[in-house]
Image (cartoon, rainbow, N blue to C red):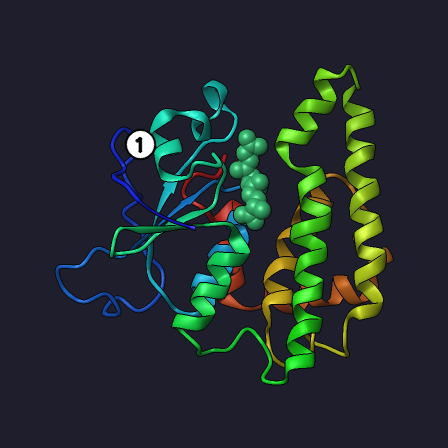
Amino acid sequence: MHARHGAAGLDKPFAFAFGRENIVPPGESPVKLYTYFRSSAAYRVRIALNLKDQPYEMVSIHLTKDGGKQNTPEYRAINPQMRVPALTLSSGDTIIQSLAIIEYLEEVYPEPALLPVDALDRAHVRAVCEIIACDIHPINNLIVLNALKKLGHDQATVDEWYRSWVIAGFEAIEPLLKPGPYAFGSRVSMADVCLVPQVFNARRFKVQVEAFPKIAAVEAACAKLPAFDKARPENQPDAE
Ligand SMILES: N[C@@H](CCC(=O)N[C@@H](CS)C(=O)NCC(=O)O)C(=O)O
């Protein structure tokens, strides 16, 4: 989905850009990533932009303060779904949905490739991404956790809900992973880009990630790469 917009009323972008400084032609603004340090969907896009060595400015959309900046009319004009991430290109076009953004980056900046050459291998990588982005994440999203609380569930029950869906997803992913160091072998793929932020969230909710040795090993391998390290929530300018 594409929309044109202005960013009036939102925080100024951080004076902060990753990647090669000369990739944006003089006079053109770099891409702008609407992000929140703790958002795992935004974390995926930060990793992909870093791997693709693309510079970007970050605009922090605080998801909880004052009812959530994602719910303001200004941000709704940027992303009608009122979620992060959103990526605004120098053309003024905005792309929403992390997987759509990452696939766009893959098509426009093919190197380093985040999808294998073989169609079957690509399907396997996308399957792992979809378990995370389409099956685990949507039922553990902030909006769902808040809805559970409104229905009267206490924090312990909500946390248990969260853990149970992560564990179900990880049980499916673990046997799908190939010999490493990364999720699908010796090259980083979109599966790693999706898996690492999900592991981060799993640990926040005290899931025993070590019960999934392949997933834990993938995370450890990715942690050594600067593109992943720079994208970590605690390394973001809006980290709290
Ligand atoms: N499927 C979307 C999910 C985006 C999403 O749900 N983002 C969360 C943060 S991880 C959000 O903005 N939540 C706002 C809210 O719940 O109000 C994607 O992959 O981009």
Residue 41 located left or right of residue 238: right
Above or below, 39 against 212 in this view is: above
Amino acid at circle 1: Leu
Q: Nearer the viewer, residue 187 or 8?
A: 8
Residue farthest along the bottom direction in this orientation: 118
Above or below, 222 against 1 in this view is: below
Above or below, 167 against 48 in this view is: above
- At 76% from the left and 76% from the top, the residue drawn is 178
Q: From the top left corner, tell me how far across and down residue 229 is, in percent.
A: 52, 59
Q: Nearer the viewer, residue 57 or 229?
A: 57
Ligand 1 shows up in the quarter that is top right
Query: In the picture, residue 219 is in which quadrant?
Result: bottom right
Q: From the top left corner, tell me how far across and down residue 91 is, in percent.
A: 24, 56
Residue 51 visible, this angle: yes
Query: In the picture, residue 182 is in which quadrant?
Result: bottom right
- At 63% from the left and 65% from the top, the residue drawn is 192
Q: From the top left corner, tell me how far across and down residue 234 is, in percent.
A: 52, 45
- At 43% from the left and 27% from the top, the residue drawn is 69
Residue 206 located left or right of residue 193: right
Q: Which residue is mark 1?
A: 10
Residue 230 visible, this angle: no
